[in-house]
Image (cartoon, rainbow, N blue to C red):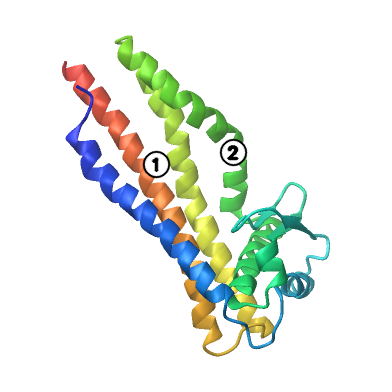
Amino acid sequence: MYLNPVYILFALPALLLGLYAQFKVQSTFKKYLRVANARGITGIAAAQELLAVSGLSHVTVEGARGTLSDHYDPRSKTLRLSQAVAGQPSIASVAVVAHEIGHAIQDATGYTPMKLRSGLVPLVNIGSYLGPILFMLGLFAANSQLAWLGVIGFSSAAVFALVTLPVELNASSRALELLQSSGIVVGQEMAAAKSVLDAAALTYVAALAQALSTLLYYVSLLGGFRRD
């Protein structure tokens, strides 16, 4: 009754893109984690150097558990690096570090999309949880207003994914500039570093596609519900 062909049409490509993005980022990261950078500089050393040249001495560096768990926390002004990234003198390590420092620079300069994304977090946490619940309750109770309220709630996740994409792309652009101007990567290493960052960016494209396809499914269900 509720399986809409429109959902299959849009959800399947989004799902396949998501799976490919995960494969691409993991395989690219592993590949260049085994390729040493010419300077032999580890991720932690690169972080200290790039933070210094960027005027971000107030940012602290800590460890993070897991793989590909590296991130910058704007609330505590902390750069958290996984063990593989911090300790390896690889191209992947310095690319990941530079990307996260790109976020630190965004934070320090008041980059508007990043501030917008941070402001959306509380709304998204509530909307992405309650939205699907309200939608299904409204659907089964034949209450279109409640169902539309659920759609609006879930749409915050799509808006968040849409805002996140330029934030991540800008951080990668800043990362490449940092790596080149600092001389941490040279020559053909730039192309390898860009491959790592491009693979990571694809995951955010996939997240946006998945959020939009789910939102489209909800709207199509409501359209069929109204016709019934």
Give how far across and how far down residue 31 sits, in percent: 51, 74
Residue at the extreme top of the image, as rendered: 141
The front one of 67 and 140 is 67
The front one of 129 and 77 is 129
Is residue 167 depicted above or below 116 in this figure?
Answer: below
How many numbered marks appear? 2
Q: Is residue 149 visible?
A: no
Residue 121, numbered label: 2
Residue at the extreme right of the image, as rendered: 58
Q: At 36% from the left edge and 48% from the top edge, which residue is drawn?
A: 209
Q: Where, quadrant-wise, is the C terminus in this rendering? A: top left
Is residue 74 depicted above or below 84 in this figure?
Answer: above
Q: At 75% from the left edge and 70% from the top edge, which residue is drawn?
A: 44
Give how far across and how far down residue 30 sits, in percent: 53, 69
Q: Could you tell which of marks 2 and 1 lies nearer the N-terminus?
A: 2
Give how far across and how far down residue 36 sits, in percent: 62, 82
Q: Amino acid at mark 2?
A: Val
Horizontal side, residue 160 vs residue 145: left or right: right
Q: Amino acid at mark 1?
A: Ala
**In front: label 2 or label 1:** 1
Label 1 packing within 10 angstroms: few (<14), some (14-19), many (20+): many
**In the rendered image, which quarter is residue 218 located in?**
top left
Horizontal side, residue 156 vs residue 42: left or right: left
Q: At 51% from the left edge and 79% from the top edge, which residue is drawn?
A: 192
Is residue 212 depicted above or below 29 in this figure?
Answer: above
Residue 211, numbered label: 1
Is residue 65 depicted above or below 9 in this figure?
Answer: below
Q: In terms of secondary structure, where does tag 2 sit? A: helix
